[in-house]
Amino acid sequence: MNSFGSFCDDFFVDMYVNTELDLPTGRDTILSFFERIQRQFPSMGNFRRRDAGDYCLEEERDGERFRWVTLEVDRICSMCANPPSLQDAYELHGLVLELAPYMLGVNHLDIGSLDVSFTMDFDFQGNHDEVVADALFGSAAFSALLDLPGARPIGFSPNVVVSLSQDCRTQARIAVEPRTSVYEIRQNKFKPDETISLYFTIRQFPDPNGRFDAARSFQHQCQIAEELMVDKIIPGFAKPLTDAIAQRRK
C-alpha cells in the first residue's frame, strides 16, 4: 500500500516525458490517444483544452483520489493524486509510455529526459517559511541570519540537485515550496487552503551511445525513488516538516 501518503495531507505520483520536438496537435491523433487511455481507465472521462493550448484528460475531482494526463507543447504529463498504492499509479504511467511511441510518434531519439516525481503536500495556515526554516535549516549556516534583531523567515525555498551516477545522467532533485506571501506575514493573516509542497524527482537523461528504453528506465527510476523516500526523504525532510507543523498547532 501507499504508506508515503500517511506522512502528508496529499501525495502525488507523477511522470513527465520531456521531448525534444513539439508533440502532435492533430485532432485525430489527440483524441485517439486519450480514447485509448480511457479504454483502460473508464473513469477518466473529462477531456478539455486549457487556455495555454494543453490537452488534458482527467477524472472527476470529487474526492482525494484522481488521475489526469496532459499533453503540453513538448511534454507528456501523467499524474495520480493519493493513489491507493504506488502500483496503481505506475499502471497509468506505464500505459502512457507504451502508447507514446506509436500514437504520438515519441521515440528514443525524441526523449530529452524522463522524470519520476513524488510530491508531498502539507496543510498549514501560517508562515510557511518559518516552518521550513525551523524544520530544515535549524543547524545550517543560513539560519544564522535569523539571529538578527527582528529577523523573520520570508524566503526559505531549498532546491537541490545531486547526481546519482558517474556520468551525471541520473539525477535526484529535492525542493520545498512554501506559499506564504510577504503580505500575509505583514498582516498576520494567512490563507487556510495553502500547502507546503515537497517535491522529490528522479530524472534520467538518455545515453547518446545507446537506445533509450523508457519503460525500463521508468522501472529503475521508481525503484531508486522508493528507496530514497524511505532512507532519506521521509526521515530527513517529511518528518521534520510534520513535526514543525504539529508544534505550531499545539
Image (spheres, helix red, strand yellow):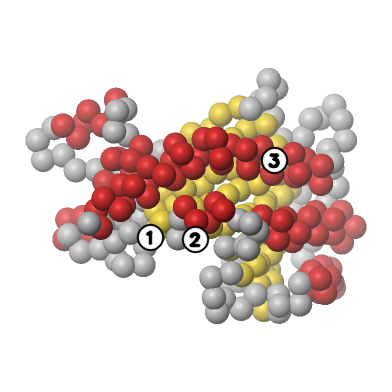
Task: Identify the mark nearer the N-term, 1 or 3.
Answer: 1
* 196 relative position to 89: left or right: left
Which residue is farthest right? 102
| Label 1, residues with CA under 10 Å away: few <14, some 14-19, many ≥20 | some
Residue 18: image x %, image y %?
70, 47
Across and down, in percent, residue 3 comes to: 56, 53
Seen from the viewer's position, the closer of residues 51 and 146 is 146
User: Which residue occupies 25% across, 58% down?
Assistant: 249
Determine whether the residue tagged by mark 3 lies in a helix, strand or loop. Answer: helix
Can you tell which mark lies on residue 10?
2
Q: CA distance from mark 3 to mark 2?
A: 21 Å
Please name the residue that numbered disc 3 is placed on.
Answer: 223
Q: CA distance from mark 2 to mark 1?
A: 9 Å
Identified by mark 2, the residue type is: Asp
Q: Amino acid at mark 3?
A: Gln
Quadrant holding the C terminus: bottom left
| Mark 2 crowdedness (10 Å alpha carbons): few <14, some 14-19, many ≥20 | many
Residue denoted by label 1: 123
